[in-house]
Image: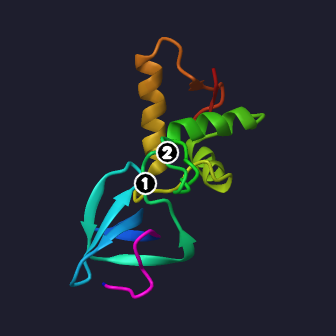
């Protein structure tokens, strides 16, 4: 999709399948095809771009940190989010409570999984079985967990 306000050096969003990637337009060809560069300085062609209004970006990749693209805040894995929730909690919690608090605190973003509570439960027991010093252990109360 060719958009008129996308010019060379403009920061845009490239749609690659169902993913959206922040890019800088480095060349424009006929037929609505753009040559773009992503955060990792990889160049590729894109047919579908969405403009980011009033934003100019650096077109070179000499900057090792690539500060021209704002990286989104990293979310923790469900297990790491569970450790953080239990660290903040004064009492043992079950997996349903842990997942709910991780989402409420913004530590973990729900995925397409239907049963994240069961996934967390399995991950906790797998860690207890395989690791010498697991971070999360069973509490005295049935079905609840606490930090080790």
Whether the magenta-drawn stretch holds residue 145 is answered as no
Q: How did the renderer colour the structure?
A: rainbow
Q: Quadrant of the N terminus?
A: bottom left
Q: Quadrant of residue 136?
A: top right
Query: Seen in the image, is 118 located left or right of residue 103?
Result: left
| Position of 60 relative to 76 (above/below) | below
Circle 2 sits on which residue? 63
Around disc 2, counting alpha carbons within 10 Å, would you say few (fewer than 14), some (14 to 19), or many (20 or more)? few
**Are the two marked residues, 1 and 2, in contact with CB atoms closer than 8 angstroms?**
yes
Looking at the image, which is closer to me, 74 or 105?
74
Circle 1 sits on which residue? 60
Image coordinates of residue 139 in percent, x first then y, are 64, 26
Image coordinates of residue 55 in percent, x first then y, are 56, 72
| Position of 118 relative to 128 (above/below) | below
Q: Is residue 114 visible?
A: yes
Residue under the point 58% across and 51% down: 73
Image coordinates of residue 45 in percent, x first then y, are 25, 66
Residue under the point 55% across and 51% down: 67
Looking at the image, which is closer to me, 7 or 123?
7
Q: Which residues are magenta?
A: 2-10
């Amino acid at each position: 999709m060719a958009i008129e306000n996308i010019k060379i050096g403009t920061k845009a969003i490239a749609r690659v399948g169902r993913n959206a990637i922040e890019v800088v337009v480095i060349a424009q060809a006929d037929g609505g095809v753009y040559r773009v560069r992503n955060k990792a300085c990889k160049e590729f062609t894109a047919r579908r771009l969405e403009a980011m209004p009033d934003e100019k970006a650096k077109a070179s990749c000499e900057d090792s940190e690539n500060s021209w693209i704002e990286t989104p805040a990293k979310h923790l894995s469900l297990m790491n989010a569970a450790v953080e929730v239990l660290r903040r909690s004064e009492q043992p919690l079950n997996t349903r409570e842990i997942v709910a608090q991780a989402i409420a605190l913004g530590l973990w973003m729900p995925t397409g999984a239907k049963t994240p509570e069961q996934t967390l439960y399995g991950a906790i027991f797998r860690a207890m079985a395989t690791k010498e010093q697991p971070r999360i252990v069973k509490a005295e109360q049935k079905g609840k967990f606490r930090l080790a």
